[in-house]
Image (spheres, rainbow, N blue to C red):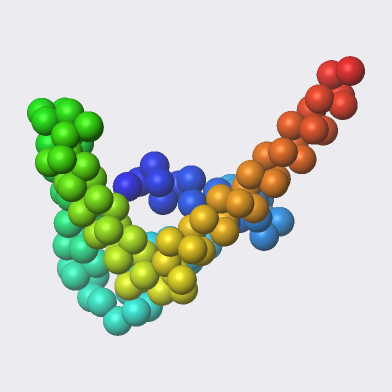
Amino acid sequence: MAIFETLISMVRRAATGRSVFTADDQHTHHRLLRAGFSQPQVALILYGVATAFTGAAVTIHIYHADSVIGMVTLVLALSGGTYVFSLAGYGKGIQETFSLFGRARKLAGSVLHLLGSLIR
């Protein structure tokens, strides 16, 4: 979860033209606090999501990703993560996340194009 949160923060900042190293209050825990959850509730929610993904990873390792049990566990973990993002006020939930990644892809394409022109 922490790696995903870091990537989302970097993409969000780069997509809005800010340095990826600047601080902001748009992290999931800040959003959950603004949505009315208490600090202990936020901690339990985030621990729950981390536990769901850990359980999914262990289940997929034991039963393999191509098994029905592995796929159901993964879908449940992803659904829980998406639900938490929507609770945190990310607007359209998964659609906003894909929009951020779309902007990041465009930004990465521009950077690669620039690097390619510098190498030539």
Q: Which of the pair 39/113 is nearer the observer?
A: 113
Residue 18 falls in which quadrant of the image?
A: bottom right
Q: Residue placed at 30% from the left, 65% from the top?
A: 84
Q: Residue placed at 12% from the left, 41% from the top?
A: 69
For the C terminus, the quadrant is top right
Residue 36 falls in which quadrant of the image?
A: bottom left
Q: Is residue 87 visible?
A: yes
Q: Residue placed at 49% from the left, 58% from the top?
A: 97
Residue 9 pos. (x, y %)? 51, 53
Instruction: Find the residue positioned furthest to the top.
Output: 120
Q: Residue placed at 41% from the left, 51% from the top?
A: 5
User: Relative to residue 89, is residue 99 drawn left or right?
Assistant: right
Residue 107 falls in which quadrant of the image?
A: top right
Q: Which of the pair 62/7 is nearer the observer?
A: 62
User: Relative to residue 76, is residue 81 drawn left or right?
Assistant: right
Q: Is residue 22 visible?
A: no
Q: Is residue 68 above or below residue 95?
A: above
Residue 74 pos. (x, y %)? 23, 45
Instruction: Find the residue positioned furthest to the bottom.
Output: 36
Q: Is residue 84 above or below residue 2?
A: below
Q: Which of the pair 53/37 is nearer the observer?
A: 53
Residue 14 pos. (x, y %)? 64, 51
Residue 66 pos. (x, y %)? 22, 32
Q: Is residue 79 above or below residue 30?
A: above
User: Relative to residue 12, is residue 55 drawn left or right?
Assistant: left
Label count reads 0
Q: Is residue 59 above or below residue 78?
A: above
